[in-house]
Image (cartoon, rainbow, N blue to C red):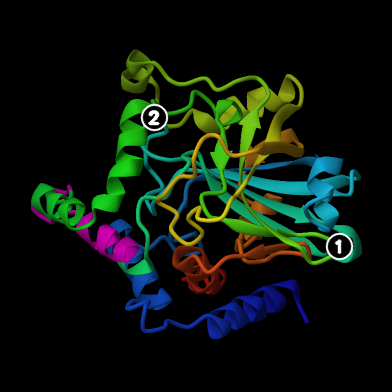
Amino acid sequence: MSALKVHLLVAALGLALVQPTQAQEVGPDQVVGALEGTFGVHPGQRRNHIKGTCATGEFVGTADAAALSRSALFSGEKIPVVARFSLPSGNPKLPDAARTVRGMALQFTLPRNDVHNMAMLNAPMFGVATPQAFYEQVVAGKPDPATGKPDPEKLKAFRESHPETKGLADFLAANDPPASYASSAFYSIHTFKFIDAAKKVTLVRWRFVPQGGEIRLTEEEMKTLPADFLEERLIAATKNGPVRWDMIVTIGEPGDPETDPTKLWPKERREINAGTLTISAAMPQKGAACEAINFDPLTMAAGIDATDDPVLQFRSPAYAVSYTKRFEGK
């Protein structure tokens, strides 16, 4: 069976296994359709986070993480990584200085060809708490044919009916975009489960923190930089030497939100350094390793598991719909 057929089969299985429930009033086809309606259809490309850059490197886990999770990710060995850095939306011309989130997706190739994926944003929370709300947000952002821009009244109505969006909005307003992908932190957003050798479960969230520190654009740079600079800066950074992030894992306690990605945990929670991500090369995504990967965050190896977060659970079938369409050339 060809690699493409395998990918499509996996995508179809992911779609079949995670169907909408009564709590999920919207289906993955509807969400992907809404993204297409708002941003247009670009055949063969992602429906969301369409604008991206590929990278490769390795990850080395720590003994502290291995004590909490039996995942081979934390074996202490060098784990090969394919990464993709991106901007949100299905707009391939979104300016790199836009005051919005950035993404980092990772695929780790573990021993015996097991695969583990992560898909993160450079904000500590998500904008909505349910798939239905995400769908409504995308629809509200559809440009008005008369102006070419979203209707401000529809956006206002959406925000007023979904007060949970304020957390991300406030974060983006208070934090200018990163000057480079290499100078940005990236957060898991969702809560996950670390499972040790004795099957003990520890609730965790994590973030990848750049060893070189976080550097943000100035207001002047946001106004004057060209539409495309993030890819060039990441490629240049890796040519000067490896770029590294520390994986910082936050340990949850009873009562911490498990299923709402818009809610943060208390700042005083215990943290450990779970390992170091090293990116040694970056390149345009066309034809590169990351282009063909479906970074489904529910593709996980033993030792790490998902919670019942409805947004996390919904991402897998939505990714499958998008993935299948683009590899069919639609």
The answer to whether residue 270 is magenta is no
- Camera sees residue 203: yes
User: Label 2's element?
Assistant: loop
Instruction: Identify which residue is drawn at 45% across, 45% down.
Output: 264
Would you identify the image quadrant in which residue 220 lies?
top left
The amino acid type found where label 1 is placed reads Ala
Say whether disc 2 or disc 1 marks the residue closer to the N-terminus.
2
Magenta-colored span: 133-149
Furthest toward the front, the residue is 254
**Label 1 crowd bin: few (<14), some (14–19), many (20+), radius 10 Å:** few
**Residue 324, position as x, y percentages in the image:** 54, 74
Instruction: Identify which residue is drawn at 12% across, 47% down.
Output: 152
The reply, left or right, for residue 155 in relation to residue 126 is left
Relative depth, front residue between 314 and 5: 314
User: Label 1's element?
Assistant: loop
Instruction: Residue 197: give its label.
Output: 1
Q: Quadrant where the N terminus lies? A: bottom right
Work out whether 284 lies above or below 182: below
Disc 2: which residue: 97
**Residue 62, position as x, y percentages in the image:** 83, 40
**Residue 173, position as x, y percentages in the image:** 31, 30
Marks 2/1 in contact by CB < 8 Å: the verdict is no
The total of numbered circles placed on residues is 2
Relative depth, front residue between 57 and 172: 172
The reply, left or right, for residue 312 in relation to residue 135 is right
